[in-house]
Amino acid sequence: MPMSCYSSVTTVRLDAIKDAETPRVHSLPCEIEHDGPAEVSAYFSATAKERKHEKTVSFRGRGLKGQEVSCPKGYTGLILQEVHKPSSDQEDGVLKVSSVFNKFTYWNLDTPPSSDDGIVMAMSWPQVANAIHAPLED
Amino acid sequence: MATKKKRSPLRDASGWVVVAADSVVGAPEEGAGDPTFARLRNPSSGGASLYLFGGGDAQVYEVKAFAEDHRSWFVGETVQRDGRLLFITPMDPLYLLLPYIQEAGAEGKFQPANQVVTDEDFPGCSRLLRCTCALESLRLVADEKEVANQRFYRYNQQKTLDWLKRKVERTVSVLKRSDVSVGGGVKSATYVRVKSEVDASDEDYLRYAHGLVSEYVSEDLSKELLRHLQLPEISSPKEEPPSKKRKLSDKPVEAGEDYTKFNSADFARKPQKKMTVAQKSLAKVDKSGMRPMSAFFGPKVKQEKK
Amino acid sequence: MDLSQFEADNSVSCRLTSPIPETCKTEDCCLGIDEAGRGPVLGPMVYGICFCPVSRKEQLKELKVADSKTLREDQRESLFLKLDEAKNFVGWALQILSPNTISTSMLQRTKYNLNALSHDAAIGLVQYALDSGVQLKEVFVDTVGPAAKYQETLSKRFPGVEVTVRPKADSLFPIVSAASICAKTWTRTTALDTRTVSFYPKTKSWLLRHLDPVFGYPQFVRFSWSTAQTLLESKAVPVHWDDDEEDGDKAAARQNNTSMLSYFSRGDSSGSNTHTHRFFTERKLQNLSSL
C-alpha cells in the first residue's frame, strides 16, 4: 500500500469564470451515449412548447414533459471541464469553470413534473445541510 | 426488429454539472488560491469521501451527487452523458476533525491539534485545521489548555454530545420549517409519502434529525447521542418486548436508522474489529486506545463475518 | 439541413425548410406552390413551395423537373435529391398537416373547409419566404379549386407580387413542378403506416444524409418507422430509457450490478455505509469517493 493512497487533489481553476458562458441547461430522462457537440437549439430548444408552465418537447420520438428549476438561494450552477486529466489516481488533476447557470430545465419521460421528482427534492439538500453544518451560535 | 440496445460502459467523465455554494466561486481574496477537491476520511463510514477545500482552505465543503439512473445533460450545444448533479455545500470541519480528536482522547492526555490530526492515508486532513474557526471550534468537543502560547486539547465526550445535541435541535427547527417529510418512515410496497406533516410527532423530527447528524459521526457516537437525546434505542421485538422499550406510536420506525441490531448490552460486548494498516501503526504507538478507535474505523458489526 | 425555422408538433402541423440561398435574398425570385395528399384518406397533407431567382429558371429546367404526375416514384425522388443539392440557388419549404389537424379543423363548429385550409397553408408558406428575405416577384400556384378567386385573394394578400393561379400549373411552370416534387416526396415519407410505405433507396439515402447523430430526425419523422429506426440504431448514438426492454445479457448485468451501475460504482466506494439516511436515499443523493 502506498504511503498516501488518497493524497492527490484536483484543482478548480476560477480564472476562466469571468469568460464563462451562460448556456441553457437541460436534464434529460435518458442516457445518451455521447459526450460532445450536438445541435441542441435547432432540434430541441426550438421545438419545445410551453403551455401553462408545462413544457413539452420530444426527443427521439419520445414525449417529454419538463419544468424549470432554479438553483437554491446562495448557490450557483457551474459546469466544470477537465483541463488536465491525471494519468493515475496518484496524480493531481486540473478543472476549470467553463460555464455558469442559475436555472435549468429537467424533463420527465411522459410524466408531468411534480415536487416528488428526485431532482426537485434534491434541491432541498443545501437548506438541510446548512442546518447540520453552519457554525452554532454561542 | 432490431436488437436491443446494450449500454456501453461509461468512460471517465470529463465534465461535471455542479450546484455550488456561492462562496466556492465568489470573490476569493487575492492570492487565496483556487478551490481543490480532496479526499478525506468519511467520519461515519471511515472510508474515503470526496470533499472540496475553498481557496486558502478557509472552508471545507461536502460533495454529494444527485444520481438518477437514465439521465444525461444538454449544456448549451453539447451533450454530457453523465447525468449526475453534484452539490457542493459548506461543511462543519469539526465533524471531520472529531474522529482524530476522539481517537487521541483515548490516550487521556492533552495534545496539540496538529499532532493529533494526521492520517497517512489522508494527508489532506491537516488542511482542516486551516479552516476559519476550526481551531476555535475544537473546544466544543475537547478540553483546552494553553501552555507557553501553545494550545493542547483532550477529547471530552460530554461536550461532544452537547454540541451534537444542539446540532440536532437546530436541524429539527429547520426541518419543521421545510417541506421535508419526516413521518411514516418505512418504505413499503404500499408506501405513499404523506404530504401533510401534521401527523409527524416531535419524536419523529428528533429521530430524523438525529439520523441526519449521525451521517457525520461514528456509529458508536450516534448511539451515545441517541441516549443523550433521551430517545430509546429501538430494539428488535424478539430481544425485548416493544412495550418496555418505548411507548411505540403506530408509526413504523425509520428504515434508514436501524438500531434493532444493537442494544446497549451488545454494544459493551462488541468484539474488536480488524484494523487497517493505519490503525495498526497507530496501535503500535499506544495500545490503550484501541477499543474506541476500532469502534470508529471498523466495519459494522452486522457485516462482520471474519 | 437548416432547422432554424423548423417548428414541429406532431399533433398539429409542422414546417420543414431548406436553407435560404443567398442569391434569393438579393435577386428577384419566382416561387411555386403545390399540394399533395388530398387523395389518401389516412395520409397527411403536404404543401410545398420552391423558389429560385427568376434569372435561373432555365437552370431549373436543366434539372429536368417536369409535372410530377408523369414521374415514377424513383424518378421523383432522385429529382428531389437534385433539388436539395442545388441549394445554392433553389430553396424549398414544406408545411405538413397531420390527419388529425385536417379532421379537427374540418369538424370545427365554424366550418373550415379543405380549400380554406389549403389556402391558409399556402399563404403561410409565402409569408415564410417573404419573412426569410426572399425577394419575391412572381408566384405560381397550382389549384384544383376556382382559380380566379384564389388568384384575387393571393394578389390582395401579397401586393407587389405577381400571382398566377392555374389548374395543372405543375405541368406549365418548372418552379411549380419543383414544389410538387418536394411535396409529393414528403407525402410518401410521412404516410402513416410503415407496412404500406416502402422506402425507396433514394429516400433512404436522404434520410441517412440528414440523420443527426444525437437527435435523429426532425419530429415529424415518425421514429417508429422501421427504416428510420434501423438507421437510428446503426448510425446514431445509443440512447437508453428507463422503460427500454432489457435483453437477457443486460438483465443479467443489472442483477450483477455490473454495467448499468457504472456511474454508481464511482460513488461511495467504502460500501460500508449501508445505513444511509432516507433523506439521502429518497433524494438519490450519494457521497462520492472520486470525481
Image (tube, coloured by chain):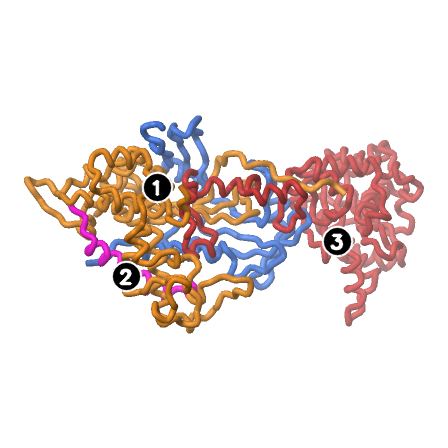
> As displayed, is residue C150 above or below residue B115?
below
Magenta-tinted stretch = B154-182
Mark 2 or mark 1: which is in front? Answer: 2
Which mark, residue B52?
Answer: 1
> As displayed, is residue C231 above or below residue C190?
above
Quadrant of the rendering where the C terminus of chain B is positioned? top left
Magenta-colored segment: predominant secondary structure = helix
Residue A4 percent coordinates (x, y) = 32, 30
Quadrant of the rendering where the N terminus of chain B is positioned? top right
Amino acid at circle 2: Arg
Q: Residues within 10 Å of mark 1 (few under 14, many from 20)?
A: many
Query: What is the drawing colour of chain C?
Result: red
Query: What is the drawing colour of chain B?
Result: orange
Looking at the rendered structure, the secondary structure element under dot 3 is loop
Spatial CA span between label 3 and label 1: 67 Å
Position of C82 with respect to C273 (left or right) is: right
Give the chain letter for blue. A
- Give the residue at mark 3: C159
Q: Is residue B219 magenta?
A: no
- Asked which quadrant contains residue C156, the reply is bottom right
Which subunit holds the residue at mark 1?
Answer: B
Amino acid at circle 1: Leu
Amino acid at circle 3: Pro
- Give the residue at mark 2: B227
Spatial CA span between label 2 and label 1: 33 Å
Spatial CA span between label 2 and label 3: 88 Å
Residue at image coords 33%, 51%: B219
Residue A138 percent coordinates (x, y) = 19, 58
Q: Residue furthest left?
A: B148
Q: Are marks 3 and 1 in contact (CB under 8 Å)?
A: no
